[in-house]
Image (cartoon, rainbow, N blue to C red):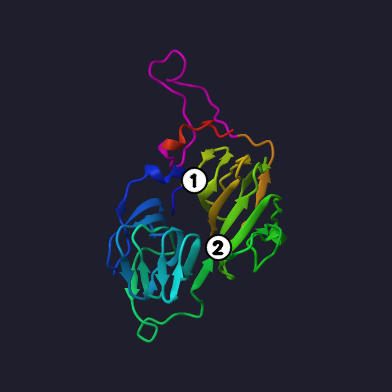
Amino acid sequence: MRPHVEFVHEDDLIWHPAELPHAQGEAVQKNLCYDEEDGSASLRVDFRTVWTRPSGLHTALTEWYILKGEVRIGDTTLSDGDYWCAPKGVLTPELEVQPGTEILLFREYGDWQFTPGDKDGDNKAKDAELVIMSSGKMKWYDVEDPVNGSPMDFERGGTPVPGLHIKLLYRDPETGFYTRLIRAEPGWVEHPLAHHPVFEEAYMLDGDFEYNFGTMKVGSYFFRPAGIRHGDFFAGKENGFVFILRCDGDLVDWYTENARVEMQGDPVNWGEGYPRSEPPVLIQPTRSKSAGKWKDPNYQ
């Protein structure tokens, strides 16, 4: 399973050779979050040279979000803010990426393996289709709007959140798995602690965001398994924030008021009067050094 990452900044991570087989060119990646059991991963990828790869099939559901640069997929040229997704079993057309291009690459339900092939050859695409979206040409919708099967499925217990807006990039109609952009208005605030029945991950594209785990800036990232409480929430007063956010099912917000997590017990061989000892802390997720220390080790 993927580890709980709360949170890291990409500048604190090291570069690795990119896991992009059957390609020509140089690319490197930073591992934002990596599932060592099935190979699912969220990656920041930079292309150092012209990079090309023939058409074929990924083992995993695969998504690219272009932070900057130029990507040609088949006959379509994508640039800053554009996105494509190949669900499992869907043929990915040939790719050509220009040097200096930076992307977010998400793999789900599988590892890096890729089998070159043609739609007329042995590798057949399934009924689902390749998804290509240009976020700059899309309209922001309030989260209350049930647009194209919005992931905010309020009939299942979700609650509308004023001040938040979305652009839905991809949603699996069977599982509810989705990827979207989410924007908060400047000064947006929400107080209760929340948790969800699905995982939630996000990479900050713009603005800043403060909550119980710290303050996130552009380039910050978290992966939060289902059931992890988080909040209060405060968007930057000048620009608010924009995330790209993914969940493996319909997002439902379950809120908790007056929450408190604390450790209790009687010290045996640590505490006041004992040399070189410190109190215990709760198990903590992976955290980037530039994020600093926890504001509260008990997450109160």
* Residue 177 showing in the rendered view: no
Q: Could you tell me which secondary element the residue under label 2 belongs to?
A: helix
Three-letter code, disc 2: Ser
Q: Is residue 17 left or right of residue 76?
A: left
Q: Nearer the viewer, residue 190 or 187?
A: 187
Residue 269 covered by magenta stretch: yes
The label shown at residue 218 is 1
- The answer to which of marks 1 and 2 sits earlier in the sequence is 2
Q: Is residue 222 above or below residue 150?
A: above
Residue furthest toward the bottom?
Answer: 120
The label shown at residue 244 is none
Q: Position of residue 159 (x, y in %)?
A: 71, 53
Three-letter code, disc 1: Val
Where the N terminus falls, by quadrant? bottom left
* Residue 285 showing in the rendered view: yes
Where the C terminus falls, by quadrant? top right
Residue 298, quarter of the rendered image? top right
x 66%, y 49%: residue: 254
Q: Which residue is mark 2?
A: 135
Q: Is residue 26 above or below residue 216?
A: below
Q: Position of residue 46 (x, y in %)?
A: 36, 56
Residue 168 covered by magenta stretch: no
The magenta stretch spans which residues? Answer: 261-289
Give the tally of numbered discs: 2
Q: How far, Cα to Cα, is label 1 from label 2?
A: 18 Å
